[in-house]
Image: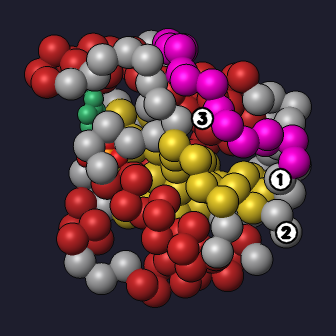
Amino acid sequence: MKTLVVYYSRSGNTKKIAEEISNKMNCDIEEIIDNKNRKGIIGWLKSGRDARSKKLTTIKEMRKDIGKYDLVVIGTPIWAALMAPAVRTFINENKGEFKNVAFFCTCGSSGDVKTFEDMEDFIGITPLAKLTLTRKELIGDREDKLKVFIKGIK
Ligand SMILES: Cc1cc2nc3c(=O)[nH]c(=O)nc-3n(C[C@H](O)[C@H](O)[C@H](O)COP(=O)(O)O)c2cc1C
């Protein structure tokens, strides 16, 4: 399956996992860039509010053609128990292009169930696999979880 890993990351956690997945799967990867400045405490507050209200943002044009991939693995940080606005915007802009999807998220501790339900509803496709990594797992061992996730989508 021709696979693309796509992710948004504000502070680097989701980026790190996206790179691990793409290295292990030996597949393409692309970052979603939010045009909105989300740095600092003001950025943090606005980000939570935007995610909670399921607001769209604007993102940089993607280089990869989503329709050319059999599988798109989508990664998001959890914000207010939902996907980040840049990921919502990416899905919105590519609706109808996805053949198969898998989801992964990074978070402090919780919100993944609601986030994945919302992503599935929004994209209209049941993901082949889902992966959550909490703060603890981001600094500790995650090899087994990554292996199970990749096995689920291959
Ligand atoms: C605005 C905002 C809201 C967040 N909301 C949650 C949450 O609801 N649940 C949770 O466990 N972590 C939450 N977090 C923590 C992030 O999900 C976590 O730090 C994640 O790994 C960040 O990923 P990144 O480094 O790729 O941006 C939130 C972080 C931000 C900035």
Q: Which of disc 1 and disc 2 is earlier in sequence?
A: 2
Please determine whether, in this image, residue 76 is positioned above or below residue 45: below
Q: Nearer the viewer, mark 3 or mark 1?
A: 1
Element type where label 1 sits in the image: loop
Ligand 1 located in image quadrant: top left
Q: Which range is magenta? A: 55-68
Q: Which numbered marker is on residue 150?
A: none
- Give the amino acid type for the residue marked by disc 1 in the picture: Tyr
Please determine whether, in this image, residue 148 is positioned above or below residue 36: below
Cα gap from disc 2 to disc 1, whole angstroms: 8 Å
Q: Looking at the magenta stretch, what is its main secondary structure? A: loop
Element type where label 3 sits in the image: helix
User: Is any atom of residue 111 visible in this view?
Assistant: no
Q: Nearer the viewer, residue 40 or 130?
A: 40
Q: Does 37 sit left or right of 9 as displayed?
A: left
Which quarter of the rendering shows the C terminus?
A: bottom right
